[in-house]
Amino acid sequence: MASSKNKAAQTLKYIALALLAALLVYIAFRKVDWAVFLDGLSQTRWVWILLFLIASVGALFFRAVRWREMMAAFDGDIKLVRVWDALNVGNVVNTALPGAGEIVRTGYVTTKKLEFDKALGTMLCERIWDIIALVIMLAVSIIFGDGRLGAFFDENVVRPLAGNTTLWWVLAAVAVAIAVFVVLVRRNRQRSRICGEIADSIGRLWAGVGAFGKSRNKLLIAITTVVIWVMYILMSWCILRAMPVMDGLGLLDATFIAAIGGVASAVPVPGSIGAFHYLVAATIGLYGISWDMGILYATLYHEIHAVFIVLLGLACYLHMIGGGKKTDNNETAAE
């Protein structure tokens, strides 16, 4: 009975997310002049789209290298190809079910030395590094860019978040509930087997979050983080170069647009559909470029990247269930 209720709750959650995505898509596209949009599409310089895809591969590759280095603190034998497959399959799952892909990719890299909890912790460690990089990108582009950028970020991101008291009360309640739960579990770990198992799981999770401190190559983690976000900036810049109307924008502008895109991607809707288009198009409008061209930029970036992610993820999945099995079996035998 409980299982049925959980499935119903999950179904309702995904329906709600899909409806939110549909609403955001409608809001983003309702003002589009399709004649202007299609004319802009016909002028696209497709060689820059190819360079965009190359930068996308670079970002994914260095993300796999960074994650493997974090996990190497617990299991130095884990193969980069295994991490690459897990990462890309997880990305495909995330396009349909936000957040579920993180669980999928964590499960695939789990070994006897690297329990699921620790692997999940390393993924959270990754997210911390990405947040730091995103904050730095925003700060650099706002400080050295046009003053309008700071005003836009304040009006469209900071103020809505700061003014949403319901959100902050919910976050505070969740934080308190988690803290109380952890304290109760730790106090009763000796009296209750279940509390003991949960406490051990939390300990392994926390150990994974601290993967950077345990890594023998901390410089590699820092360097790959820089390279990953440079690739994201280059991806943004390539789409700017692909559109003749964007010729006046440079790398600093691409940095700000990429940072706003990163913020939009955190919105928990399938594939960030709608949220990405709206925020990015609004950002591009700051430069005096029409909403139609802003939407075209967002569409080229988001949809081409989404298709690429799905195709790459499917290829990695086929490798996982085919050739990847041999590697897994060899590793299991070695253990």
Image (spheres, rainbow, N blue to C red):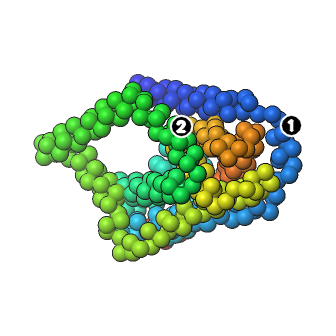
Q: Nearer the viewer, residue 125 or 78?
A: 125
> How many neighbours does mark 2 have within 10 angstroms: few (below 14), some (14-19), or many (20 or more)?
few
Q: Is residue 237 left or right of residue 220?
A: right
Q: Tell me, for residue 282, which label it has, or none.
A: none
> Is 39 situated above or below 118?
above
For the N terminus, the image quarter is top left
Q: Nearer the viewer, residue 242 or 63?
A: 242
Helix, strand or loop under label 2? helix
Q: Is residue 32 left or right of residue 188?
A: right
Question: Whole-percent x and y of residue 53?
Answer: 70, 61
Q: From the image, state whether disc 1 or disc 2 is nearer to you.
A: 2
At x 43%, y 56%, the residue is 132
At x 18%, y 42%, the residue is 183
Question: Whole-percent x and y of residue 12?
Answer: 52, 26
Helix, strand or loop under label 1? helix
At x 69%, y 65%, the residue is 54
Residue annotated with mark 2: 156
At x 63%, y 61%, the residue is 251
Q: Is residue 320 visible?
A: no
Residue annotated with mark 1: 35
Question: Whole-percent x and y of residue 125?
Answer: 39, 57
Q: Sequence-wise, which precedes: disc 1 or disc 2?
A: 1
For the C terminus, the image quarter is bottom left
Q: What residue type is disc 1 on? A: Ala
Q: What residue type is disc 2 on? A: Asn
Is disc 1 in contact with disc 2, using a CB cutoff of under 8 Å?
no
Q: Return the residue found at the far front.
A: 147
How far apart, in angstroms, are the residues tagged by discs 1 and 2? 28 Å
Question: Whole-percent x and y of residue 323?
Answer: 61, 66
Q: Is residue 132 visible?
A: yes
> How many neighbours does mark 1 have within 10 angstroms: few (below 14), some (14-19), or many (20 or more)?
few
